[in-house]
Amino acid sequence: MKSFLYPKLNPPSFTWVRPESGAEIAKVHEWIQPLTADADSEKSKDADFVVVGVPLSRSSISASGASEFPDAFRRAWKGFTTYNLDEDVDLSSRMAVDVGDIPMHVTDIHRCHDNIIQASAVIHEHFKTSKVCAIGGDHSITAMMVKGLHQARPDEKIGILQFDTHFDLRDLSDNGPSNGTPMRNLIESGVVKGSNMYNIGLHGFFNTKDLKRYADEKGVTYITLRNARKKGVEETVRQCLAELAERVDTIYFTVDMDVLDIAYAPGVPASTPGGMTTAELLEGVLAAAKHPKVNAMDIVCLDPLKDTNVQPTVKLGTHVFLTFLTGVMLR
């Protein structure tokens, strides 16, 4: 069946057989419901969580199969329960819907980006109170999801919390809107001020000095992973959000999985040594999700084709998503 938002969205790339009506829900794949018909749209308007796949990776600087993550992500649900033992929270008490995937053109990246903006705007207009979770895809999708949010809510001032190894402030004139440019794209398009961007997790030898100079000129706040560890990742996130919340109406949270050390996340296009541990990332995600102004998020740059057979990175990406939902419920 077609998504009720067709042609803005395609049906989910993969769906599970649903449990019988009245059956106890214990696993994530039994809980998140695919949204496939007009009849479902009115019922879903008040959904707590909305999942949308954004299967684009042709705009990645590094060779990337991140477009395969939305499908791998959905397939991974069966390995997770809805109950978070650490926080004594059961996600199944809330409503979650999967609205499918944003359609992509085989060769036209500009058209793909336009599709993301349009779909994001429609999603944010329809699901006015839902927490929208975009599953990428490379990091170029973030600029487009935020632009769509801006179109839907032009009166809201948007801030960015970014977990990343990279600034993502490359010059768009060099290679167009790629996964290295989303933050600069948002600054230069006037959608988000540089002073309303906070980046946590930069480390090592993976950024050029000119990008730091640009960040300083535009007032971007960045905290290296070394400095975040000195203060504690959780406390660093809380302080950044406290500052950001004073200046903006809504906060978009983006998790680039290359912020992780290669030992924890082999399945990313630009894997690096010296990054976050799994525990640090999940701690930071939970802290971010607890903040009342964090209303949308994405997970990007996770390449299942580079992952090992047991899919540690795919599973961790799914864990990040479920941890975010947990944090929202703990507000």
Image (cartoon, rainbow, N blue to C red):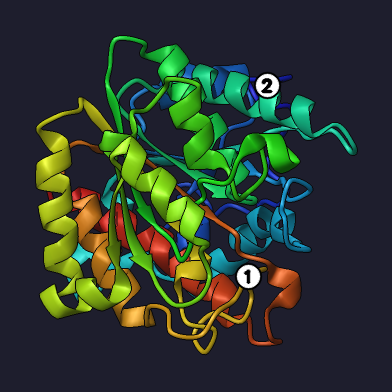
Residue 165 place in picture, x, y as percent:
46, 66
- Where residue 56 appears, as percent x and y from the top left, is 72, 45
Q: Residue at x 28, y 17 (%)?
A: 156
Picture coordinates of residue 4 (x, y %)? 63, 20
The residues bearing labels 1 and 2 have C-alpha atoms spaced at a distance of 30 Å
Which residue is identified by label 2? 8
Residue that appears at 23% across and 49% down: 328
User: Viewer-nearest of labels 1 and 2?
Assistant: 1
Q: Quadrant of residue 320?
A: bottom left
| Quadrant in the picture for residue 266 | bottom right
192 with respect to 179 (left or right):
left
Residue at coordinates 31% horizontally, 73% vertically from top-left? 225
Nearer to the camera, 309 or 138:
138
Decide if residue 79 is on the left or right side of residue 213: right
Amino acid under label 2? Lys
Do callouts 1 and 2 mark residues in contact (Cβ within 8 Å)?
Answer: no
The relative height of residue 30 versus residue 125 in the rendered view (above or below) is below
Few, some or many residues within 10 Å of mark 1 (<14, 14–19, 20+): many
Percent of width and height locating residue 69: 66, 59
Q: Which residue is under mark 1? A: 270
- The residue closer to the viewer here, 206 or 246, is 206
Q: How many numbered circles does the render carry? A: 2
Question: Vertically, is 260 above or below 172?
Answer: below
